[in-house]
Image: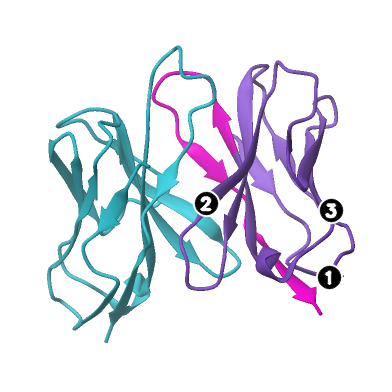
Chain colours: A purple, B cyan
Amino acid sequence: AQTVTQSQPEMSVQEAETVTLSCTYDTSESDYYLFWYKQPPSRQMILVIRQEAYKQQNATENRFSVNFQKAAKSFSLKISDSQLGDAAMYFCAYRSRDYGQNFVFGPGTRLSVLP
Amino acid sequence: DVKVTQSSRYLVKRTGEKVFLECVQDMDHENMFWYRQDPGLGLRLIYFSYDVKMKEKGDIPEGYSVSREKKERFSLILESASTNQTSMYLCASSLETAFSGANVLTFGAGSRLTVL
């Protein structure tokens, strides 16, 4: 079974600075998807960014980018120019490419943004 | 936009009560999921369904059951609520097709259940 680990329960960053959230996963599969989800306080979980394992290029969405290291099974999220609205729980998730598969989530990292 | 709607945002129930949590999605997604979210544990899958009347147990199905009679609706049932089922429950859905690329979960707002 796949597992996802986020070793930083809490992180903080100064507004306008850059922060990197770590995620590692364990799998024997070669093709899969990885995701970062954001859950703001008392608000809905939303997708931040996704990566397909067969693509070597790291995904980027505006201020959010990932560092995908397939051999190391590492999938970190970098937030540039941090904003107060980035404060949230961030969850790393894994999904097999096979039909009907579950999404496996890490325990989450709580990010605080300091003004 | 895809919408996943959970019927109750907050519920308070007594031990032993039967509890229904309803979830409806409006984008014809094949897959629907029920997760439980607890601090420090992330999201743990209770049940998921990849088709009408189909269901699969997740990591923590004990004490729960589900029903999917229509494609758009996925219900979570606590037959006899217990205090250790006090938690946030998240419903989600996703499209399932070989051509969809990375299937993405769309979440509801969550249902916070307190069992006294």
N-terminal label among 1 and 3: 1
- Label 2 with label 1: CB-CB less than 8 Å: no
Name which residue lies at 74% across and 43% down. A62
| Residue under pointer 3 | A80
Q: Chain of mark 3?
A: A
Q: Chain of mark 1?
A: A
Q: Secondary structure at mark 3?
A: loop
| Residue under pointer 2 | A46
Name which residue lies at 17% across and 34% down. B71
The answer to whether residue A4 shows anywhere in this view is yes
Q: Is residue A106 magenta?
A: yes
Q: Secondary structure at mark 1?
A: loop
Disc 1 residue type?
Glu
Circle 1 crowding by C-alpha within 10 Å: few under 14, some 14–19, many from 20: some
| Residue under pointer 1 | A15
Residue A63 x, y percent position in the rendering: 77, 48
Q: Which residues are magenta?
A: A94-115
Q: Decide: is B107 above or below B78.
A: above
